[in-house]
Image (spheres, rainbow, N blue to C red):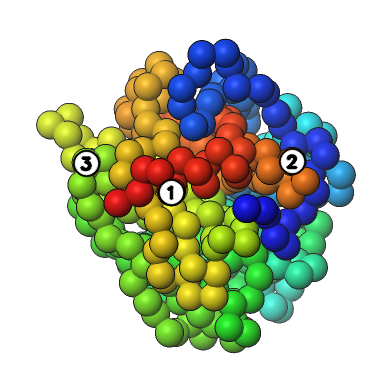
Amino acid sequence: MKVINGEIINNIPWEEKPAGCKDVIWRSRNNPIITRDAIKNSNSIFNSAVVPFEGGFAEVFRSDDQTRKQLLHVGFSKDGVFWEIDDEPIKFMNEKGGYNEFEYGYDPRVCKIEDKYYVTWCNGYKGFPTIGIAQTTDFKKFLQLENAFLPFNRNGVLFPRKINGNYAMLSRPSDKGHTPFGEIFYSESPDLTYWGKHRLVMRPCGGWQSTKVGGGPIPIETDEGWLMIYHGVLTSCNGFVYSAGAAILDSEKPWIVKYRTKSYILSPRELYECVGDVPNVVFPCTNLCDAETGRIVIYYGAADTVLALAYTTVGELMDFIKKNSY
Ligand code: BMA
């Protein structure tokens, strides 16, 4: 199988799989790569979105400040590991050239479609969570578009090309609180403003994904379908546990799930994943894939406190999904 419509990223962060590692995903030896205090006045820096940009990388970071306001910041990096992060949060512009009021924003994803980068995030609208969208070409000016859906919704994940002639997005309808349920839905839009043709993609099922499931990073296109990493949650006697799994979705009808992992591919295990502001959370918002080598680097938030990296390859992950599917 091979990656299609993908970018060649020669400088993708990479570490070889440690000898003796039996897992399909392996963690960076340098984790966490971003500590909670890397931004002035930050309480935590975690679920964040990276894209290749001008020969290096750009990132939209989720950071909660020390008042515990949830904010988005921009950063740049040459190698995808060491980052220079702007201490000032992103200010989103409107069509009139002014700045929009920003209530709160978290869990960003960044998707390149044609010649623009689109940020989607959980955006506070009159106190209700829904999906914000903004576009940028330089990561300096961000033009905010209409919110995609009615509240309550979270985890908006765009596809990197139009499908059936429309923009396509995954989302997870939710509630105002910590939402004890969650399914992944698929929607299309001709213009990024009006969304419809909603289809159910995936419900929770057993074990690590028994309480809720939600989109993760931007899906990777392969000649066997969309490779999608997602998060799944189980309710333990000590609260939610967030893990990650993977699925292969049909290329032109992405609401059709061809394969889906029975076991997780990444689950809280290391100290920085089990201890923090919210213990027992791994939450991936990015997977970069080098179309030439098939190398994948995953950026994930750990324990809602820090940002970490993990690696795999398209070949290994697709194989794992097919052999461990429901
Ligand atoms: C989700 C989101 C994520 C967070 C996770 C675990 O609902 O709020 O930002 O990482 O819960 O707390």
Q: Residue at x 26, y 40 (%)?
A: 208
Q: Is residue 11 left or right of residue 218?
A: right
In the picture, the disc for residue 322 is 1
Front: mark 2 or 1: 1
Residue 222 visible at all: yes
What kind of residue is marked 3? Gly
- Marks 1 and 3: in contact by CB < 8 Å? no
**Pointer 1: residues within 10 angstroms few (<14), some, or many (20+)?**
some
- Horizontally, residue 40 falls left or right of residue 171, namely right
**Visible in this render: residue 84?**
no
Choose between 77 and 177: the one closer to the eye: 77
Q: Amino acid at mark 1?
A: Lys
Q: Is mark 1 within 8 Å of ligand 1?
A: no
Q: Spot the residue most to the left.
A: 237
* Residue wearing tag 2: 293
What is the crowding at mark 3: few (fewer than 14 residues within 10 Å), some, or many (at least 20)?
Answer: some
Circle 3 is placed at which residue position?
A: 207
CB at mark 3 closer than 8 A to ligand 1? Answer: no
| Mark 1: secondary structure | helix
Horizontal and vertical percent for residue 69?
46, 44
Residue shown at 57% from the left, 13% from the top: 19
Q: Check if mark 2's residue and mark 1's residue have beta carbons within 8 Å.
A: no
Q: Amino acid at mark 2?
A: Thr
